[in-house]
Image (tube, grey):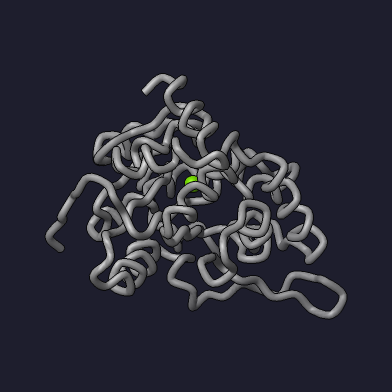
Amino acid sequence: MHRAPAPPPYGTIVFDCDSTLCSIEGIEDLAGERAAEIHALTERAMRGEVPLESVYGMRLDMIRPSATDVEALGRRYVATLLPNVAELTAALRSLAKRVCIVSSGLLAPVRAVARAIGVEPRDVFAVDVRHDSSGAFLGFDASSPLARAGGKLAVVRTLAAGVGAQPPVALVGDGATDLEALACCARFVAFGGVEHRAPVFAAADVGCDVADFAALLPLLCSADELARLARDPVHAALVTAARALPH
Ligand SMILES: [Mg+2]
């Protein structure tokens, strides 16, 4: 696919969840005592050494998270949101942008994040899991594109196509699976505020190593949009915070 990188403004902003909106990796949080083992598998996929689908089902089968575990993860995601995530989301939405979360994490916990930061349920894309009536793990939606390599590209391509004549898509993420969507992004922002992954930064249009979402504001908005936010009493503080951060 021919890439068309472009400066702001953007009509749709897509965020990854794990190690981007939140400082944890959900699957490792669920893993408990097996976290190190699961971390090693996740890292291989995020570095692009193995395709995601080769570790996705394996990790869930090792952990078999109960309904209670999955619910608790939603609370931990919300507790580990990076500074100014909700403020940035509100500012972007005030500029009439569509804000989406596209994650290979589990749907219910990612929806908890969306609720906490004011993202619409229809703009959350993640992998559903099934439990029986006692809450025991039954399996995951293996048909979800987000459980395999190239899935983010498929989802973001659909979002980009749906935008029509509106300005294009910008994506913020930390991992190799995010980078797969590069081809249909007008701007790919490598986020290193939690984990700095050199190959992702090398391929990205721009990078951000600051663990504060205010730093993303000037990377996602045009000068005109920043001026509009600076004049808005609700969002002016975020613009001030962004200007005070290193870039
Ligand atoms: Mg991530």
Residue 127, compared with residue 15, is above or below; it is below
**Number of residue marks:** 0
Residue 97 relative to residue 153: left or right = right
The N terminus appears in which quarter of the rendering? bottom left
Q: Quadrant of residue 161?
A: bottom left
Residue shown at 60%/34% (left/top)?
A: 83
The C terminus appears in which quarter of the rendering? top left
Q: Position of residue 104 (x, y in %)?
A: 51, 59
Is residue 147 visible in the rendered structure shown here?
yes
Residue 26 relative to residue 46: left or right = right
Residue shown at 74%/45% (left/top)?
A: 32
Relative depth, front residue between 154 and 206: 206
Residue 124, compared with residue 10, is above or below; it is below
Is residue 40 visible in the rendered structure shown here?
no
Q: Position of residue 61 (x, y in %)?
A: 65, 63
Q: Position of residue 182 (x, y in %)?
A: 27, 53
Looking at the image, which residue sits at the far left?
2
Residue shown at 23%/57% (left/top)?
A: 183
Residue shown at 30%/46% (left/top)?
A: 188
